[in-house]
Image (cartoon, rainbow, N blue to C red):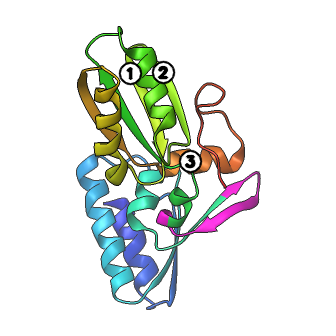
Amino acid sequence: MRRRLDIALGLVHRPRVLFLDEPTTGLDPESRAVMWREVERLAAEGLTILLTTHYLEEADQLARRLAIVDSGRIVVVGTPEELKGGLRGDQVALELRDSAALDAAERALRAAPDVHSVLRDGSTLYAFVPNGARALPQLVQAVERAGAQIAQASLQRPSLDEVYLAATGRAFRAEGQGAMLH
């Protein structure tokens, strides 16, 4: 309720710009969702909102444009989709039923069109591609043609967390596994 009151007080004078500093910090999930809806409503009414947050899923949900700041400097600016699109691409994960054909499946993925890189973790292969939805069926076929049986396939789009880590040079995964900006 305190956060809602703070916003209400900020709106009394009908400003053209509203500054919100970490408005959802410490809120429970229900209150956080209510706050998001209110911010979206205010923006739809034409109010410019400058919002600071450490919750990057919040920025992804609410921001039309965002700037990532590191040590007081803006290191990257753009829409969430532009920034995520600048990473290595989507990640297609193919978990194999057994590891007997793992080497052949990995070679098949590396030879597939548009595959930037392939990583192996146990019996799961990860292929990084520009468009995972388009590539997924082709990658499944390539792995099956190599003699492997797939237990599970999944697709993951880049997140703003990965954008942040790539833009600031922080480590995310083991060497060669982190997202990189073009």
- The residue beneath circle 3 is 88
Point 34% across, 88% down: residue: 45
Q: Does the magenta stretch include residue 76?
A: yes
Between the C-alphas of marks 1 and 2, the distance is: 6 Å
Residue 145 horizontal/vertical position (percent) = 30, 28
Q: Which residue type does callout 3 highlight?
A: Arg
Q: Is residue 96 magenta?
A: no
Q: Which residue type does callout 1 highlight?
A: Thr
Q: What stretch is highlighted in magenta?
A: 69-81
Closest to the observer, 51 or 172: 172
The reply to whether the C-beta atoms of the residues labelled 1 and 2 are less than 8 Å apart is: yes
| Prevalent SS, magenta region | strand
The reply to whether the C-beta atoms of the residues labelled 2 and 3 are less than 8 Å apart is: no
User: In terms of sequence position, does the residue under pointer 1 or pointer 3 come before the other?
Assistant: 3
- The residue beneath circle 2 is 120
Residue 162 horizontal/vertical position (percent) = 54, 45
Judging from the image, what secondary structure is the residue with disc 2 in? strand
Point 33% across, 43% down: residue: 138
Closest to the observer, 93 or 168: 93
Residue 47 horizontal/vertical position (percent) = 43, 86
